[in-house]
Every structure is written in structure tokens, then in C-alpha cells.
Image (spheres, rainbow, N blue to C red):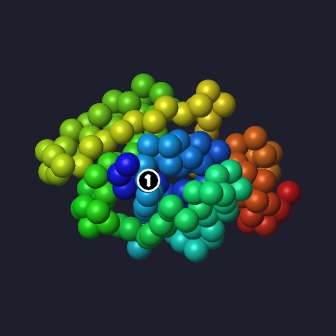
Amino acid sequence: MAKAFYTGSFDPMTNGHLDVVLQALNVAEKLVIGVGVNASKKPLFSFEERAEFLKRGVAENLPERAGDIEIIAFSGLAIDTAREKGASIIIRGLRDATDFDYEMQMAGMNGAMAPDVQTIFLPAKPASRPISATLVRQVAAMGGDVDHFVPDYVAAALQQKFPR
């Protein structure tokens, strides 16, 4: 089994993100999760908070695999970071055809830059397909209920950010 690299903003981590992480641990021995940081953007949650959400998600769902993840902050090209971390696989989650079209282009570019790193697409479960972190933030900001879209501890953190 190989080391895989999975990236995202995880701002906030959704049930969809967690689903992909758990699936990735079925295909990889080790999983490096790259939390995207961009100095020009102000995230809702700090890197530390997002990393804690991810760690907790794995610990609660696959406690025997909690030691098999590494969470890093990253910026720049995912393919470069994957190679730096020794990953031979890039994991990408797919919700719909729009994701597929974009991710296929990205996989092609990554394959041209690093033919030794394979991209694996993992389909979202039906319940996770409509979920995006952007929509979750918007619903929470307007006082909506996001309990079906994020783990309970993320919902509680969102409630702290956006009291109803």
C-alpha cells in the first residue's frame, strides 16, 4: 500500500470531506492531508482548527487508523507537495460531472508534471454529493441548520462563529 495526498480548504470540514478521507484510508497505508492556506484569503477557521476537525473525524470513525494520517498546511502546487511528502497517489473526491471535468484536467496536468504520481478519484456517497464547504458557510452565516452536512463538533464550532 502507498502513501496518498489529499488536499482541500476544509473550511469547514464537511461530511463529504470526511467521507473521502475515510475512503482514502482504504486505499493507502498513509494519508497526508494538505490543508490549503492562502495568505491573501481569510479563512473562517484557522489551520489548527481545521486540522483538529480532520484528526477528530478519523479518530471517531477509524480509531485504528488515526496514526496513519499527517495533516500539513500547504500552498502552491499539490503535485509538488505530494512528491515532497513521498506520496505516489493524489486523492480527489468527486461529487458530480462538474467535479469530474475539472478533476480530469487537473489529473492530466499533474500526470504530465509527475508521471510517477497517480490520481485516484473517489466518489462521494449520495448523501454528501450536494455538500460544499462554501454552501455550509453560507447556510451557517444565515442562521440555517447545517447539522446534516458536517460532524456535530464542526456544527458546534460554526454555531460559535454564527450564533443564531
Q: Residue at x 59, y 31 (%)?
A: 125
Q: Quadrant of residue 135?
A: top right
Q: Quadrant of residue 44?
A: bottom right
Q: Can you give x and y, in whole percent of width and height, for residue 24 in the image?
A: 48, 46
Q: Residue at x 62, y 27 (%)?
A: 126
Q: Residue at x 58, y 74 (%)?
A: 48
Q: Can you give x and y, in whole percent of width and height, for residue 111 in the image?
A: 19, 44
Circle 1 residue: 29
Q: Quadrant of residue 40?
A: bottom left
In the displayed structure image, the side of residue 97 where residue 114 appears, left or right: left
* Viewer can see residue 69: yes
Label 1 sits on a secondary structure element that is strand
Residue at the right extreme, as displayed:
164
The C terminus: image quadrant: bottom right
Q: Residues within 10 Å of mark 1 (few under 14, many from 20)?
A: some
Amino acid marked by disc 1: Glu
Nearest the camera: 59 or 162?
59
Nearest the camera: 158 or 72?
72
> How many numbered markers are drawn?
1
Nearest the camera: 146 or 86?
86
Q: Can you give x and y, in whole percent of width and height, for residue 73 in the image?
A: 44, 70
Q: Can you give x and y, in whole percent of width and height, for residue 32 in the image?
A: 43, 61
Q: Residue at x 26, y 67 (%)?
A: 84
